[in-house]
């Protein structure tokens, strides 16, 4: 069984999703609204490994760091690990413009999560969900590119049109967290 | 007077531009074709500071690390520090598509350079050049977004339509390097 998990993020949406899942499985968690350095890499797992190392130095064991990105097939994986920067600059509109006239709208949302145990041992878990990029933004839930991502397994709604618990049914982040929950023995 | 400057980059174009300028001022330099970790930050100076720290640990004093980015005004500064990733994914075509129908085509090319002296003292120099994004790609010189960047002070050609020494007359990178040359007392 885990001790209290320290969720390190400045993103309230991320905290909401992770804490809801952890709490519903009986895992206590606290929000550390702190920033850790992120490296530039095409590999989310590499990014969280380095961030989690710093988080462990600062806040000790049981820290959890998560990073995610939207990988659009027709755009060579763009915006990928830089999704939050791209969201802040060109936004949903920019991404939709890049896909104007493009028939292949397949995209993956990917998540990588690093949890650091006592002694500094890092555990990495990843998750992904396949979907398509909508023709326009829909919904106000979630955050980031959620209003334009329609998961394949859903009913045609975007992530932003779902409640938090609906999104947590098959989001990339929820799937990465499942790995940690299995490790805790609580799935 | 400087010792031999160790230019750390995996980019042959960067090495070509920096070494041409250094050599023409009588500064000896060697190419260290190595990779240093880059952090995610909107501030190029922050990125080179961290990279140079690692470069100094690995290759010792007199290392020089440079990073640059294209900051497009109408796109909130995109692609900025992530220019090389954006170039590899959506490329020139993607950037041009984002600016279709946009009248404001102003952009800045920015460069930040960090040089580490004996004892680990870091010196940071920055440079920038203002220009506009061309309607289409032109030229085969330079690298990255050079084929679509027309510097304001030029004659209407893109950076990629210039020779290396023409580009070095007013590029962002050349301007950052001027700071170091002044520090060496050789401008």
Image (cartoon, coloured by chain):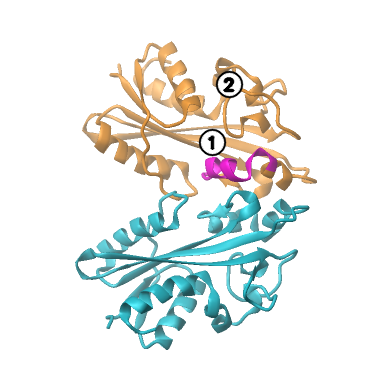
Chain colours: A orange, B cyan
| In the depicted structure, whether residue A65 falls above or below residue B63 | above
Q: Which residues are magenta?
A: A81-93
Q: Residue at x 77, y 45 (%)?
A: A100
Q: Residue at x 53, y 44 (%)?
A: A85
Specify the quadrant that holds the N terminus of chain A.
Answer: top left
| In the depicted structure, whether residue B173 falls above or below residue A65 | below
| In the depicted structure, whether residue A60 falls above or below residue B104 | above
The residue labelled by disc 2 is A167
Residue B32 appears in which quarter of the rendering?
bottom left
Residue B100 appears in which quarter of the rendering?
bottom right
Which chain is indicated by disc 1?
A: A
| Crowd class of label 2 (few under 14; some 14 to 19; many from 20; radius 10 Å) | many
Tell whether position A9 is magenta: no
The residue labelled by disc 1 is A110
Residue A7 appears in which quarter of the rendering?
top left
Position of B139 with respect to A5 (left or right) is: right
Mark with earlier residue (1, 2)? 1
Identity of the residue furthest to the right in this view? A101
Foreground label between 1 and 2 = 2
User: Residue B142, percent across and down?
Assistant: 58, 74
């Amino acid at each position: 069984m885990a001790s209290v998990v320290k969720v390190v993020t400045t993103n309230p949406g991320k905290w909401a999703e992770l804490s809801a899942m952890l709490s519903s499985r009986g895992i206590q968690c606290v929000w550390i609204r702190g920033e850790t350095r992120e490296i530039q890499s095409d590999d989310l797992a590499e990014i969280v490994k380095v961030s989690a190392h710093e988080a462990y130095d600062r806040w000790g064991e049981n820290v959890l760091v998560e990073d995610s990105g939207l990988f659009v097939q027709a755009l060579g994986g763009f915006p990928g690990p830089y999704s939050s920067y791209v969201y802040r600059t060109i936004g949903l509109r920019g991404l939709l413009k890049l896909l104007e006239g493009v028939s292949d709208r397949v995209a993956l949302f990917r998540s990588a999560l690093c949890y650091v145990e006592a002694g500094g041992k890092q555990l990495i878990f990843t998750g992904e969900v396949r979907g398509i990029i909508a023709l326009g933004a829909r919904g106000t839930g979630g955050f980031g590119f959620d209003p334009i991502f329609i998961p394949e397994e859903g009913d045609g709604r975007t992530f932003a049109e779902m409640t938090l618990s609906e999104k947590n049914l098959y989001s990339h982040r929820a799937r990465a967290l499942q790995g940690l929950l299995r490790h805790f023995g609580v799935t």
